[in-house]
Image (tube, helix red, strand yellow):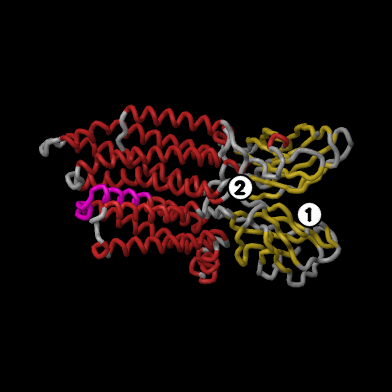
Amino acid sequence: MTITAPRLHAWVLALVAGVGLLLGGAAPAAAHAVLSDTAPARGAVLAEPPSRVDLVFSESVSVSRDGIRVLDPSGRRVDDGRPTAKGGGTYAVGLSGPTARGTYTVSYQVESADSHPVAGAFTFSVGEPSAASAVPTVRDPDTGLVGRSYAVGRFGAYTGMIVMTGGALLLLLCGPRGVALPTVRRSTAAAWVLLCGCTLALLLLRGAYVGSGRLADVVDVTRLAETVRTKFGALLVLRLALLAGCALLWRYRGRIGGWCSPRVALASAGVTGLAVAWTWAGAEHASTGPLPYLSMPVDALHLLAAGTWVGGLLVLAWALVRAGDEVPPEAVVRFSTVAFLSVCVLAVTGLYQSWRQVGTLSALVDTRFGQLLLLKAAGVGLLLGLALMSRRWTKRLARRDREDRAPLRSLRRWVGAEAVVGLCVIAATTALVSTQPARTHGPASTGTAPSAAVSLRMEFDTGGREGRGSADLVIDPGRRGPNAVHVTLTGPDGGLLDAPEVQISLTSRTGSIGPLPVPVERVSEGHWTASGFQLPVAGDWDLSLTVRTSEFDQTTVKKRFEIP
């Protein structure tokens, strides 16, 4: 909360240096899971119905019993409902005797290694393509009652963790008097209850959130068992066990020494807090990509530093409003020192994670993840400014006479303002966790240098409402032979545009080949991709992109590029 001017200047210099590192760029990291290959191949025409369908993802995924569905030309489900892992991100589902000829549709809803749902669909045909094939709905998991409830639970869990960390810190800083601070003690206990309740809610909602989206599935015991077997579900169970252990330690603290040994108490709280924070780091963005075993402890430290600073502010603000004389002035001064150290940790770990998840300046300003990150950084900057303003009142509080109420009243106002901004920072953090990292908008890792890929930006306007936007296309590795094609659509507001239809074709100007349709498939909001597309010759090519934003609004734009 309180930062002296020399220390603030040093921190600002470190921040500027870190931003320089961020703007310097980074190598692309692994993205959310993407469907990289299928058997039968996407768009293939077979002479006879296959006995099974294989899906190959770019990374390990978790699949529920309804995660892969195969529909015949009439829309009847013909898979056996038992997806089987084959290793290396490959899953197979058997077909229960399909006999119809025509176009089959395969839809999938899986959970990537960083716990995010990934959905999509593709088709293949038997005999010849049908005039009309079944088109399943690719569900957005963040919509509907289940999606909104899950978002609320995620925010509540973060808030509970941060407030509980800050409250526990204040109790430790108050020494033996900490047990006698009812406001701080009740705030910490309430945060523990909130964290437990939201964690349990996330565990129950998880199966429906990544699966059907139906509220009735929340009480499905089979789905709950499937959730517990996933990495994310197991970490939620571990979090509940650790929180139960915290409650037992507090309940029987007198029998194990109480507060007689502050160092032991502080060390125990630190280890337990790190273990609880690890249940977030091990399940989300930090657990995938390069150097996850460095990124996960960094992410856990980042969460604990946020809890120490922001959570401590929230509890302190409530204590000052409810009972200003309850918190010892010397504890407030000690909290100022610890808060400064936590800000330093927060800055270093935050810059590292930003560099890792964003990578480039353009991604920082052009993607929703980058924009949310900038919003969060602005909130943290405002918190630092408010902390600077409250510095003198903290010092005066430590030296005040009992009859002088001015320092306490002023400190209440400034700490209260910091607490409000802190809640906004928590909300921005919650949104970041559920947003696709900016790094995933680049080309997938193929062993080829990123500079070899062809990158194109095309502006379009379908003429309809909010029909303006831009398309970023990446052809990787950008040479003759098999290539991966990635398309990211951005709307007029700068956010991802989830258009109903995107079509791409390529025509060679030197070899008179084409137009060759590129079978791009939607893999996530605003993102389409195709893997293994063959460019038969080098030279100049014309790319034609058709975007449909509504039933009647559609446009086609073209751009030329060269394949060496």
Describe the element under mark 2 as helix, strand or loop. Answer: loop
Numbered range of the magenta stretch: 162-182
What residue is pinned by disc 1? 43
| Residue 270: in magenta span | no
Amino acid under disc 2: Glu
Q: Nearer the viewer, residue 338 or 418?
A: 338
Q: Residue at x 19, y 44 (%)?
A: 328
Q: Position of residue 29 (x, y in %)?
A: 61, 44
Q: Position of residue 85 (x, y in %)?
A: 66, 64
| Residue 181: in magenta span | yes
152 sits left or right of 385 in the view: right
Describe the element under mark 1 as helix, strand or loop. Answer: loop
Amino acid under disc 1: Gly
Label for residue 525?
2
Q: Tell me which numbered mark, 2 or 1, is placed earlier along the sequence.
A: 1
Q: Position of residue 407 (x, y in %)?
A: 19, 35
Q: Position of residue 342 (x, y in %)?
A: 37, 41
Q: Identify the residue at the far right of this view.
A: 512
Q: Residues within 10 Å of mark 2 (few under 14, many from 20)?
A: some
